[in-house]
Amino acid sequence: MKKILPLVSLVLLTSACATQTPPPEPQVITKVVKQNTAPVEKKGYDDGCKDAMKAQFLPTKEVVDSYDKVSQAAYLKGWEMGYRRCVIGLGPVKINSTMPTGQNH
């Protein structure tokens, strides 16, 4: 029995080491922040309408460049909607490719 006890202890110790699992990988939590572009789009809409009344076919470059990429897209979307709404003062119009605002910038 005295010879078996050290052998059993050795087996238990080595089996305990073999069954240990490595610690889990740390979780990476990312948070997506959605930018509220509604005020920028509204400004674009208002500017587009004003530009249509002044027969200005493109948004002001300095204003567009003052925004980051996400806000630029929202501003240009609003500008085009405002321009289409006010260009003839009666309502929506179809912009074709021959008009400056219908061409890709």
Image (tube, rainbow, N blue to C red):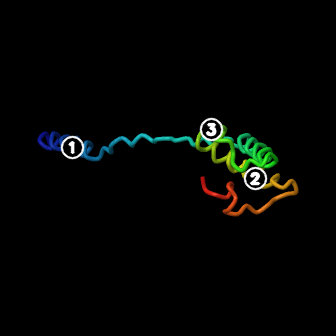
Q: Amino acid at mark 1?
A: Thr
Badge 1 marks a residue whose secondary structure is helix
Mark 1 packing: few (<14 Cα in 10 Å), some, or many (20+)? Answer: few
- What's the CA distance linking mark 3 and mark 2? 18 Å
Q: Is residue 27 above or below residue 91?
A: above
Q: Which residue is mark 1?
A: 14
Residue 80 percent across, percent down from the top left: 72, 52
Disc with the residue nearer the chain's start (3 vs 1)? 1
Disc with the residue nearer the chain's start (2 vs 1)? 1
Residue 38: quarter of image: top right
- What's the CA distance linking mark 3 and mark 1? 64 Å
Residue at 84%, 55% in the rendered image: 88
In the image, taking residue 40 as reference, residue 17 lies left or right, namely left
Q: Amino acid at mark 3?
A: Tyr
Look at discs 3 and 1 and give the one toward the viewer.
3
**Which residue occupies the extreme right position in the image?**
90
Q: Amino acid at mark 2?
A: Met
Residue at 74%, 47% in the rendered image: 56
Q: Which residue is mark 2?
A: 81
Q: Closer to the camera, 103 or 2?
A: 103
Q: Are marks 2 and 1 in contact (CB under 8 Å)?
A: no
- What's the CA distance linking mark 2 and mark 1? 73 Å
Disc with the residue nearer the chain's start (3 vs 2)? 3
Q: Which residue is mark 3?
A: 67
Q: Is residue 35 above or below residue 92?
A: above
Residue 61: quarter of image: top right
In the image, taking residue 9 as reference, residue 49 lies left or right, namely right
Mark 3 packing: few (<14 Cα in 10 Å), some, or many (20+)? Answer: some
